[in-house]
Amino acid sequence: MKASTKLRLLKLAILFPFVALAAVIGGVLFQAQGGFAALRVPHGDATPLATDAATLAHGEYLARLGNCVTCHTTRGGTPYAGGRAFRSGYGTLYSTNLTPDATTGLGDWSLAEFRHAMREGASREGLLYPAFPFDHFKRLTDEDLAALFAFLRQLPAVDAPRTPNALDFPASSRRLLLAWRMLFHRPHPFTPEPSQSEAWNRGRYLVDGLGHCAMCHSGRGAMASLPADRYLAGGRILGQNWYAPPLDTNSLARWSVDDLAGYLRHGVSTHGAAYGPMAEVIYVSLRHLRKDDAAAMATYLKTVPAAPAPVMSATERDLRQRHAAGRVVGTAGRRLYAEHCESCHGDDGRGRGLDYPPLAGNPHVVADDAVNSIRLVLAGGIPPTTPGNPRPHSMPPFSQVLDDAQIADVLNHVRSSWGNEATAIAPGDVRALRGSTLD
Amino acid sequence: MSSLPPLSRIASVLVGIAIVVTTLAMPGRARADDADAGMRERLAGCAVCHGDRGQGAHGAEYFPHLAGKPAGYLLEQMRAFRDGKRHYAQMIYLMQYLDDAWLAEVADWYAAQPPIVKQAESGTPMREVDVARARQLVFDGDPAKGLTACSACHGRALAGLEPGVPALVGLPTEYIIAQFGGWITGVRQSTVPDCMASIARKLEPTDLRIVATWLSRQAAPDGERPAAAGTRALPLACGDLPVEAAR
């Protein structure tokens, strides 16, 4: 045997266990993401679609709760015709046409293919990006999926070809999505919790399923994943300068079930008013919630265990202390508050009923991440119009009236008054958000 | 006493009626005041830029006044922001989750406010030739270039026409120029046929600046309202507004 051949064999012998191990791990991960199920996209399906009014009305209700129209419509564009851009660190992805156009929409889809896309996140296009909440929609019952599809299929067909995505490699490759799925996608079956009430189970079905609340309200892990231990733990929304607060038993303690259900349908409450992405969710989707469904969601949300708070080292605690907003406010912040804010939010920071939200004891206002407060002061806000609040009050934009330092001052006053204790924000934090009115 | 003298009987009845009428009318009056205060409060968010009755605000001269503009015009603008046809980020942000019913109420309220249309700018005097050219374009148009007179639609007082044609006085030069830029590039769109877009494409940039500057220096008499709907037909097709029969 030649020396070089021997060496090659030796190398192989050494490498073999590693290769084998990699293959085993790969196999396990492949199984974990659902095995071959996702890759087997069904085509034909002779199930006739229901066209009776009750099924269509039910499908429309589900489409509203799933907020399909928000993601599948551009501003001012034809509803459900797709084309909305989703920006992230990986580039821009565009949503698709859900109208029954035969070439550009769902016109020649079968119910089986639709069900497969909604549950497995794969269609004739290949694997679908997780910006499409299939990880939530997979919980929908067969009946609900059939009603949803029946509703989509009777929309007016619109010829709207897909806008090509502008994603960077490797995110641009649908095949490589398999690697992402192997790392992060775990299609656990959804089983009711018999020890909980019917309302609780219905609430969980809506929150985790159609409502896909976790897409915004959960913390993100590596590569935009949604790790289980950050479930509804709050965090920055992917690709947007907005912070979605935690939804759990602690953070929602101040709400009664009725208050919370009212907020979801009306967009206002004595604890806070909706703005930014949440205003959109309510305006387009939740304002159509039936009362019992809203109560069910509130019932469930109020029982979600709080994610453990990140452990803080002694130095971090010390740093926080030194950065407490209370240490940096001078009289400027108080004066600015009295001049510009008090007439609505009150000298005690308690706001006024459903008209003006409280700033005292409001967890958004003391969140470490102050983006929401800064953006509201810069751009103002009007809660969405809803049947329960058809004539909303408003907050003026202050971007022209106050400079960066003044906005930091007045917010540091808010963040350290009436029992609020939060870290200080700096003028630079404000400057960074000027111009992000619409992102 | 069998009966009161007739005169005092009539007097007491009259006094009685007067008391009933005033007590009935008072809460009505108070209700109207409350409704007005309620609207002003709800629209506090708009006041920084547009004034608390839409009369314009100090330090925010770039922003248009709203008071007394035709309700239909105001409604269409607010919907255009909401629906992606007008592209000013701050306005889109505020309008995006408001439904037609509320926007219509807001439009009606601003339309009902007394128009106080001051000249937007004074600045250095304009050259005679420029004034003459501006007046020609505004009141006679330039048929050779296919330009209709502005006053044909906006009225000789430039106070607008219900329901869709706004007043032209009281707007800053740069604001007017920016709107024309928007029409030319398609960034600002109205219901088709978009008459302003076609006019904007025919107006030379030098003429635009002259007209915009001249307009910014005009004022309307206090309380001058847009002409009532139907008092004038438009010489060209604008959205779904009524047009003069072809001659």
Image: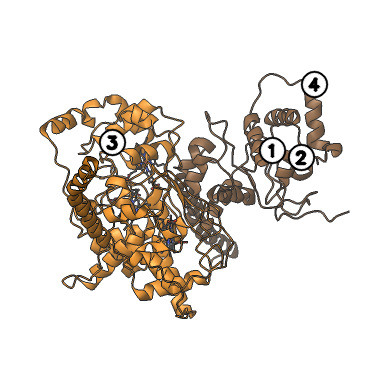
Chain whose colour in the figure is orange: A
Indicate whether A133 appears above or below A366: below
Residue extending farthest to the left is A314
Q: Residues at marks 1 and 2, common chain?
A: yes
Looking at the rendered structure, the kind of residue marked 2 is: Cys
Q: Judge left or right: residue A364 versus residue B111.
A: left
Q: Residue at x 55, y 51 (%)?
A: B83
Determine the chain carrying the residue at label 4. Answer: B
The residues tagged by marks 1 and 2 sit, at their Cα atoms, a distance apart of: 9 Å
Residue extending farthest to the right is B247
Indicate whether B109 appears above or below A185: above
The residues tagged by marks 4 and 1 sit, at their Cα atoms, a distance apart of: 21 Å
Determine the chain carrying the residue at label 1. Answer: B
From the image, tell me which residue sits under label 3.
A414
**Looking at the image, is mark 4 or mark 1 earlier in the sequence?**
4
From the image, tell me which residue sits under label 4.
B128
From the image, tell me which residue sits under label 1.
B168
